[in-house]
Image: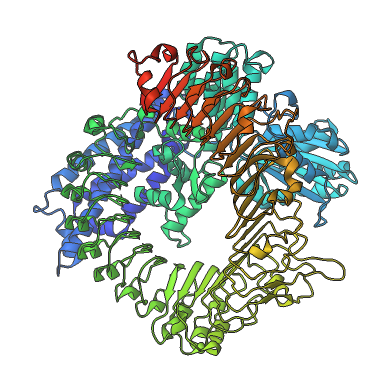
Amino acid sequence: MALEAVGGSFLSSFLNVLFDRMASREFVDLIKGRRIIDAQVKRLNTMMFAVNGVLEDAEEKQITSSAVRKWLDELKDAVYEADDLLDEIAYKAFRLKMEAGSRTFGDQVRGFFSSRNPFKKGMEEKLDDILDRLEDLVKQKAALSLRDGTGDKPSSQKVPTTSLVDESGVYGRDDDKEAIINLLLSDDANGNDLRVIPIVGMGGVGKTTLAQLVYNDIRVQDFEVKAWVCVSDELDVFKVTKDVLMEVTSLTCENKTLNQLQLELKERLKGKRFLLVLDDVWSVKYTDWEILQKPFMSGAQGNRIVITTRIDHVASTMQTVPALHLKGLTDKDCWSLFAKLVFDDGNSSTHPDLEVIGREIVSKCKGLPLAAKALGGLLRSKRDVEEWEKISKSSLWNSSNDDILPALRLSYLYLPSHLKRCFAYCAIFPKDHEFEKEELVHLWMAEGFLVPSPADKEMEEVGDEYFRDLVSRSFFQRSSGHHSYFIMHDLINDLAKQVSGEFCCRLDGDDSCKITKRTRHLSYVGTEYDSGMIFDGIYEAQFLRTFILMEWSCIDNEVMHDLLLKFRQLRVLSLSQYRSVTALPESIGYLKHLRYLNLSTASVKRLPEILSTLYNLQTLILRECIYLAVLPDSIGNLKYLRYLDLSGILIRRLPESLSGLFNLQTLILCHCKDLVELPTDMARLINLRHLDIRGTKLQEMPSQMNELKNLHILTNFIVRQCGSNIKELGKLQHLREKLCIWNLENIVDAEDALEADLKGKKHLKELELRWNDDTANSALERGVLEQLQPHANVKFLSIVGYGGGRFPDWVGDSCFSNMVSLKLSGCKYCVSLPPVGQLASLKDLSIAEFGRIEVVGPEFYGNCTSMKNPFRSLKILKFERMPKWHKWISYIEEDESRAFPVLQELYIRECPNLMTALPSHLPSLTILEIEGCLHLVASLPRAPAIIKMKLKDDSRDVLIKKLPSELHSLILDRFYSSDSILDRIGSFFATLEEIEIRNHDSLKCFPLDLFPRLKSLRITRCPILESLSTCETTHENFTSLSSLEIRECPNLVSFLKGRLPAPNLARLLLLGCSNVESFPVKMLLPSSLTSLKIWDFQNLKFLDYSGLQHLTSLRELEICNCPKLLSMPEEGLPSSLSSLSVFLCPLLEQRCQREQGEDWPKISHIPHVKVNFHKIN
């Protein structure tokens, strides 16, 4: 069943916004006294109420009725026009207010429709046109059988699930299955009789399948009672109770009250251990959940309920343990699932051409099992390559929507009206586009999608709620690459595209859509080769509201001028990376509806004055406009501006008029590296909630910062000379997230620091305290730090440049149980460390530049009696640049409890005098790096879990790493001592898979026979190296070795004269064997070789065919900088070669010239030939 645009999906919330606008005082005042306009508006109101009543019924019917779908599209188009007109009226009213000078607002609005107003006739005509369209649509209601009133819940033809599963068709869920079973079988540490385990994920990801696997596992058969109930809707207490009872008794339970059902169920479960699966729960009220649970409490201990849901909120309402968020399958598992359906026994070897295409198709599934199964079923009987290629190049929705669409459409249909508008708008994003929450909320706000909250919430807070709700429902997922970014699964992206229909379009290469008169939102993914011609088709969309340039663009000024002239209804204009011009066209002044303007990284050098007439502008982003150095004073006219991002521009000062932007909530100035001053009247920005001034040259804060009482985020506060302004922080009680206080050396009275009231700021999570100069007053600095104690909720604390001799008692106090990160740096007068070992949640500790610390001892671990293991949560520990530190005393109690039980990473850098051993037992350590600590090389801890070890100082550089195969790699560099590091790492011999040795002056023989699993060996600049084996004539074959590189080892002669005992070697590179005249000798190289590179053989004259003729697998031969090499072998080169490269070999290059060279007949059969970096074949 194909799904077209769900046109009525967001019209109800859209109409509500229009109703609110027409009821506003400003609008009523505006039309007062204008009989014609007043009558038209009342008629418009009536028409919209008439259609609003049937929207829910129309939304259901449009899925199967093309006539209803067409009606909804026409209605949406008309409502858009009405909204544009109302917005134009509101803009005109505000412009008159701004420009009329001493005239009263009443005079302005009465003059709005006067004979001097050029828009009078146009306004009335537009209203008449819209009214005629709406009246016609209202008349069609009866013909379409649309009913007034609230429609039913979204209907679904979905067949109820059962507990049966074919396990042979399930792939990639072993780990998830084990995690759920462990939760089912393990005891509850909290003593709960009932454990509820949610499985959460987007539609089609395999939640039900996982629940079925668990339900049928032999290990859960010990449950005396098992029941499977498919909910597939809001959790109805009566229905679910009846279904559970029917599962338990196998009897029908008709004509019974809820009380009778629950009493009987309680009796049936009494004293028994049961497992219940509630599959596909969409919504639940906590009170209903409480009622449903009551009969379950009569069971024995160890009862379990597994629920599956797409919605985080449902999981959080019902769960007793954290939910399992189910991810997509890997490409490998997805392919296995697909191949099992398509090929006999899942074996694709008989159809290699189809396998290549099939893997491309599977990659489009992005790990969604439902999509892989649907496509597999579609292609099961097809063996024609062209049909497979057609599927590969088409949308998955077009290929297999019978299965995929209904599953994902349900998620959309269950959205409340306001979220449907927001989600459908996301169709403008290309697939795999990463977006930030803040970015999307501002776009929604600009388009008017955010419905004002009766709880007096700011629009940004409403947008945050909408966004979190869509994340909770799996429409958005966190990006795996950037944690602060989000993406949509490709199929969710396709869903947005389908439900938005022709109202949202993308110009995106092959993924472009048709632009029509109804198109309101458009994004363009530019390429280097696009020209202005590509925009010819978009002029059809004359009422466009959104135009976003995605990624790089090459639009020139003339094209942009034309676009702005044409699209005067724009509310969103994003010209990010608009690098083609240095000035915005003056035509931008026509965009009177504009709410959102993004010019980030554009090449503009100035902003036109006409920009100040865009009175509706709410969001202005000028991030990294590096050629922009001045803002016009007229920016103060943008009275509705709420968000201003100037980060990374070269501005030195902000215009004073900026202080008049009373609605401004966010001001981003981070990395404005030339900014030296803020406006003096910043205190007037009473609605400011976010001020980011990181990376600027500001030397002080404006006065009266304490007036900005709504500030939630203040990244930096700079203490000015005499230091009293720190008291202004005291009244900023809403501060949260991160705060860095600079120039604490300017405080002259510690009591001023007390008035900052950091201890009262319970929402502050990250605090950095910085002294940037030496006061030479240790007692004062300790007093200041004493008074800057934060609230116990703080999680991240940094203290930099502190000049006291000791830390106050609060630093390291166990009351800071939430602290997870602590960084102490540049505290050059401290003679001891604070007792940070007693911080129960501390995971990351960094200590640097403590110039007077000599011993780290008992004080470091603390003496809190409740802490059996100091640093019990610490995972990362760093010591850096501590020149006098020479002793580290380990912590071991009589009961042998030890510190650092879970420490995973230990870094010690530039501590040249540290001599005593590190803690001897670190059971969880995986990474150890010691740099600039020569005396510590011989005192390494026992660390059975190590995956990376680095030892680096003036004479050595050793790196051991665990590879994905669970084996290790070893890199040795700069060994000028006679000690053999190989003797010290004997425990790694059996697991080493990769070895690289550089600059080892004492290595004479590399013991290849000691490394049975070695796959890759690289040896560089080892001047006395003679052989690769401890035995002169070894008969052992090194079957694992597949890659060998030897560079600049002039004495490695015996190797070149014997036989290389590596029967599976595939890649060999030799560089700098200057004493060799003929290469290779007969049978030196194994026949398995596929790539041979010969570089810098200064005396090589001949290639020996007897050593090449048996290389039947050789594909690549590269010869570089062999100036004496005369010619190719007379017999030619192996016929298997597909690539030959000859560089910096002047004699040979002449002979290899195409057609003319003497050796050309010997190499002409090779498909790819390069001579002196030029491809000649």
Horizontal side, residue 895 vs residue 462: left or right: right
Q: Is residue 894 above or below residue 750?
A: above
Q: Is residue 138 visible?
A: no
Residue drawn 70% across the image and 62% down it: 873
| 98 relative position to 1130: left or right | left
| Residue drawn at (38%, 43%) of the image | 49
Q: Residue furthest right?
A: 271
Name the residue located 31 percent from the left edge and 73 percent from the top edge: 677
Q: Quadrant of residue 1014?
A: top right
Percent across and percent down for residue 1113 are 58, 18
Q: Residue at x 64, y 49 (%)?
A: 1002
Image quarter in which the C terminus is found: top left
Query: Residue 961 placed where, x, y %?
Result: 65, 47
Taking the image as shown, residue 363 lies to the left or right of residue 515, namely right
x, y percentage for residue 554? 26, 39
236 w.r.t. 217: above or below: below
Residue 597 picture location, percent across and down: 30, 51
Q: Nearer the viewer, residue 535 or 1045?
A: 1045
Of the pair 456 and 898, the residue shown nearer to us: 898
Q: How is the image coloured?
A: rainbow
Q: Is residue 11 left or right of residue 832?
A: left
Which residue is at the front of the view, 39 or 760?
A: 760
